[in-house]
Protein backbone atom coordinates (compact mmCIF):
# COMPACT_ATOMS: atom_id res chain seq x y z
CA UNK A 1 0.00 0.00 0.00
CA UNK A 2 2.81 2.41 0.96
CA UNK A 3 4.73 1.44 -2.19
CA UNK A 4 1.69 2.31 -4.36
CA UNK A 5 1.43 5.68 -2.60
CA UNK A 6 5.11 6.42 -3.27
CA UNK A 7 4.74 5.45 -6.97
CA UNK A 8 1.61 7.58 -7.24
CA UNK A 9 3.42 10.56 -5.71
CA UNK A 10 6.32 10.14 -8.15
CA UNK A 11 3.91 10.02 -11.07
CA UNK A 12 2.10 13.15 -9.89
CA UNK A 13 5.39 15.01 -9.42
CA UNK A 14 6.34 14.04 -12.99
CA UNK A 15 3.12 15.58 -14.36
CA UNK A 16 3.48 18.69 -12.21
CA UNK A 17 6.39 19.86 -14.42
CA UNK A 18 4.09 20.27 -17.45
CA UNK A 19 4.21 24.05 -18.02
CA UNK A 20 0.51 24.45 -18.83
CA UNK A 21 -2.58 25.11 -16.75
CA UNK A 22 -4.98 22.12 -16.79
CA UNK A 23 -7.68 24.25 -18.47
CA UNK A 24 -5.26 25.05 -21.30
CA UNK A 25 -4.65 21.33 -21.75
CA UNK A 26 -8.42 20.82 -21.97
CA UNK A 27 -8.66 23.45 -24.71
CA UNK A 28 -5.73 21.86 -26.58
CA UNK A 29 -7.69 18.59 -26.57
CA UNK A 30 -10.61 20.25 -28.38
CA UNK A 31 -8.33 22.06 -30.84
CA UNK A 32 -6.59 18.75 -31.61
CA UNK A 33 -9.96 17.12 -32.35
CA UNK A 34 -10.94 20.01 -34.65
CA UNK A 35 -7.64 19.65 -36.50
CA UNK A 36 -8.22 15.86 -36.74
CA UNK A 37 -11.63 16.53 -38.27
CA UNK A 38 -10.26 18.73 -41.05
CA UNK A 39 -7.17 16.67 -41.79
CA UNK A 40 -9.26 13.52 -42.32
CA UNK A 41 -9.83 14.37 -45.98
CA UNK A 42 -6.10 14.74 -46.59
CA UNK A 43 -4.80 11.87 -44.48
CA UNK A 44 -7.28 9.64 -42.58
CA UNK A 45 -4.53 7.83 -40.69
CA UNK A 46 -3.12 11.06 -39.23
CA UNK A 47 -6.69 12.05 -38.37
CA UNK A 48 -7.17 8.85 -36.37
CA UNK A 49 -3.87 9.42 -34.56
CA UNK A 50 -4.92 13.00 -33.75
CA UNK A 51 -8.28 11.87 -32.36
CA UNK A 52 -6.45 9.35 -30.15
CA UNK A 53 -4.09 12.12 -29.08
CA UNK A 54 -7.06 14.36 -28.32
CA UNK A 55 -8.56 11.72 -26.02
CA UNK A 56 -5.17 11.21 -24.33
CA UNK A 57 -4.75 14.96 -23.80
CA UNK A 58 -8.26 15.06 -22.37
CA UNK A 59 -7.26 12.47 -19.77
CA UNK A 60 -4.05 14.37 -19.05
CA UNK A 61 -5.74 17.57 -17.87
CA UNK A 62 -7.14 15.91 -14.75
CA UNK A 63 -3.81 14.32 -13.88
CA UNK A 64 -2.03 17.69 -14.23
CA UNK A 65 -4.73 19.38 -12.13
CA UNK A 66 -4.16 16.86 -9.33
CA UNK A 67 -0.37 17.06 -9.67
CA UNK A 68 -0.37 20.87 -9.43
CA UNK A 69 -3.17 20.97 -6.85
CA UNK A 70 -5.30 23.03 -9.26
CA UNK A 71 -8.51 21.00 -9.05
CA UNK A 72 -11.48 23.32 -9.39
CA UNK A 73 -15.17 23.18 -10.12
CA UNK A 74 -14.65 25.39 -13.16
CA UNK A 75 -11.94 23.03 -14.45
CA UNK A 76 -14.18 19.98 -13.95
CA UNK A 77 -16.98 21.82 -15.73
CA UNK A 78 -14.74 22.81 -18.66
CA UNK A 79 -13.48 19.22 -18.88
CA UNK A 80 -17.04 17.86 -19.11
CA UNK A 81 -17.93 20.35 -21.82
CA UNK A 82 -14.77 19.56 -23.80
CA UNK A 83 -15.59 15.84 -23.58
CA UNK A 84 -18.90 16.48 -25.31
CA UNK A 85 -17.26 18.73 -27.93
CA UNK A 86 -14.61 16.17 -28.86
CA UNK A 87 -17.22 13.40 -29.08
CA UNK A 88 -19.42 15.64 -31.23
CA UNK A 89 -16.55 16.38 -33.62
CA UNK A 90 -15.76 12.70 -33.99
CA UNK A 91 -19.39 11.67 -34.49
CA UNK A 92 -19.92 14.42 -37.03
CA UNK A 93 -16.95 13.13 -39.01
CA UNK A 94 -18.45 9.64 -38.95
CA UNK A 95 -21.81 10.88 -40.18
CA UNK A 96 -20.15 12.86 -42.96
CA UNK A 97 -18.46 9.74 -44.18
CA UNK A 98 -21.34 7.27 -44.03
CA UNK A 99 -22.62 8.66 -47.32
CA UNK A 100 -26.17 9.62 -48.13
CA UNK A 101 -28.21 11.42 -50.75
CA UNK A 102 -29.22 13.87 -48.04
CA UNK A 103 -25.85 14.12 -46.34
CA UNK A 104 -26.05 17.84 -45.73
CA UNK A 105 -29.43 17.47 -44.02
CA UNK A 106 -28.04 14.69 -41.83
CA UNK A 107 -25.09 16.90 -40.79
CA UNK A 108 -27.30 19.84 -39.89
CA UNK A 109 -29.71 17.57 -38.05
CA UNK A 110 -26.80 16.17 -36.07
CA UNK A 111 -25.49 19.69 -35.37
CA UNK A 112 -29.00 20.67 -34.34
CA UNK A 113 -29.11 17.69 -31.98
CA UNK A 114 -25.80 18.79 -30.45
CA UNK A 115 -27.03 22.35 -29.97
CA UNK A 116 -30.31 21.32 -28.40
CA UNK A 117 -28.64 18.82 -26.06
CA UNK A 118 -25.79 21.07 -25.04
CA UNK A 119 -27.93 24.11 -24.23
CA UNK A 120 -29.79 22.06 -21.63
CA UNK A 121 -26.77 20.03 -20.54
CA UNK A 122 -24.59 23.07 -19.88
CA UNK A 123 -27.21 24.58 -17.57
CA UNK A 124 -27.71 21.35 -15.61
CA UNK A 125 -24.02 20.47 -15.51
CA UNK A 126 -22.96 23.90 -14.23
CA UNK A 127 -25.45 23.58 -11.38
CA UNK A 128 -24.38 19.97 -10.71
CA UNK A 129 -20.71 21.00 -10.50
CA UNK A 130 -21.60 23.79 -8.09
CA UNK A 131 -20.53 26.60 -10.42
CA UNK A 132 -23.96 28.21 -10.39
CA UNK A 133 -26.73 28.30 -7.84
CA UNK A 134 -30.13 27.07 -8.90
CA UNK A 135 -31.28 30.69 -9.03
CA UNK A 136 -28.38 31.71 -11.32
CA UNK A 137 -28.82 28.69 -13.58
CA UNK A 138 -32.51 29.59 -14.04
CA UNK A 139 -31.49 33.14 -15.04
CA UNK A 140 -29.20 31.80 -17.76
CA UNK A 141 -30.55 32.66 -21.17
CA UNK A 142 -29.48 32.56 -24.77
CA UNK A 143 -30.44 33.59 -28.24
CA UNK A 144 -32.59 30.48 -28.78
CA UNK A 145 -34.34 29.12 -25.70
CA UNK A 146 -36.12 25.78 -25.60
CA UNK A 147 -39.63 27.12 -26.28
CA UNK A 148 -38.55 28.99 -29.39
CA UNK A 149 -36.43 26.03 -30.50
CA UNK A 150 -39.37 23.62 -30.20
CA UNK A 151 -41.60 25.95 -32.22
CA UNK A 152 -38.95 26.24 -34.94
CA UNK A 153 -38.46 22.46 -34.94
CA UNK A 154 -42.19 21.94 -35.51
CA UNK A 155 -42.11 24.48 -38.34
CA UNK A 156 -39.09 22.65 -39.80
CA UNK A 157 -40.95 19.36 -39.63
CA UNK A 158 -43.95 20.90 -41.44
CA UNK A 159 -41.63 22.36 -44.06
CA UNK A 160 -40.00 18.97 -44.50
CA UNK A 161 -43.37 17.50 -45.44
CA UNK A 162 -44.57 20.27 -47.76
CA UNK A 163 -41.50 22.27 -48.83
CA UNK A 164 -38.42 20.05 -48.25
CA UNK A 165 -35.84 22.56 -49.50
CA UNK A 166 -37.01 25.17 -46.98
CA UNK A 167 -36.78 22.63 -44.16
CA UNK A 168 -33.04 22.46 -44.78
CA UNK A 169 -32.73 26.25 -44.41
CA UNK A 170 -34.80 26.14 -41.25
CA UNK A 171 -32.70 23.31 -39.79
CA UNK A 172 -29.53 25.25 -40.59
CA UNK A 173 -30.83 28.34 -38.79
CA UNK A 174 -31.89 26.36 -35.72
CA UNK A 175 -28.54 24.56 -35.65
CA UNK A 176 -26.62 27.84 -35.85
CA UNK A 177 -28.72 29.60 -33.20
CA UNK A 178 -28.65 26.55 -30.89
CA UNK A 179 -24.88 26.45 -31.15
CA UNK A 180 -24.68 30.20 -30.45
CA UNK A 181 -26.87 29.67 -27.36
CA UNK A 182 -24.49 26.96 -26.18
CA UNK A 183 -21.51 29.33 -26.62
CA UNK A 184 -23.38 32.16 -24.82
CA UNK A 185 -24.10 29.91 -21.85
CA UNK A 186 -20.55 28.59 -21.77
CA UNK A 187 -19.11 32.12 -21.57
CA UNK A 188 -21.75 33.15 -19.00
CA UNK A 189 -20.70 30.29 -16.70
CA UNK A 190 -16.98 30.78 -17.20
CA UNK A 191 -17.30 34.51 -16.46
CA UNK A 192 -18.87 33.83 -13.03
Image (tube, rainbow, N blue to C red):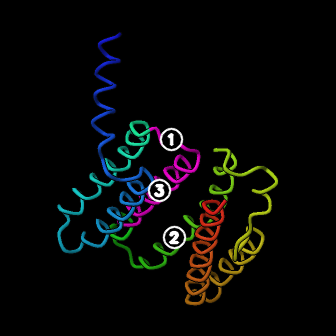
Is 145 in front, or is 183? 183
Tell me: 18 left or right of 129.
Answer: left
Q: x, y (%) of residue 91?
A: 40, 60
The image's mark for residue 111 is 2
Q: Decide: few, some or many residues near mark 3? Use Cα within 10 Å; few <14, some 14-19, many ≥20.
A: some
Cα–Cα gap, marks 3 and 1: 16 Å
State which region is magenta: 69-93
Q: Mark 3 points at which residue?
A: 82
- Give yes or no for residue 27 being in the magenta stretch: no
Q: Decide: few, some or many residues near mark 1? Use Cα within 10 Å; few <14, some 14-19, many ≥20.
A: some
Question: Mark 2 or mark 3: which is in front?
Answer: 3
Secondary element under disc 2, as helix, strand or loop, is helix
Cα–Cα gap, marks 1 and 2: 31 Å
Question: Mark 1 or mark 2: which is in front?
Answer: 1
* CB contact under 8 Å: marks 3 and 1: no
Residue positioned 38% across, 49% down in the render: 58
Q: Decide: few, some or many residues near mark 2? Use Cα within 10 Å; few <14, some 14-19, many ≥20.
A: many
**On screen, residue 155 above or below 55:** below
- Give yes or no for residue 79 being in the magenta stretch: yes
Q: x, y (%) of residue 160?
A: 61, 81
Q: Name the residue under label 1.
A: 71
Where is residue 115, by image quadrant? bottom right
Where is residue 128, by image quadrant? top right
Secondary element under disc 3, as helix, strand or loop, is helix
Amino acid sequence: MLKNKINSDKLLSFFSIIPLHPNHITIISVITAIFAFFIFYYDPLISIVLFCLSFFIDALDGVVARAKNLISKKGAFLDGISDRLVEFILLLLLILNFGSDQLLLICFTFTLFFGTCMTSFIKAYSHHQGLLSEKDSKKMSGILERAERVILLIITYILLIYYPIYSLYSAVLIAIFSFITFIQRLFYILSK
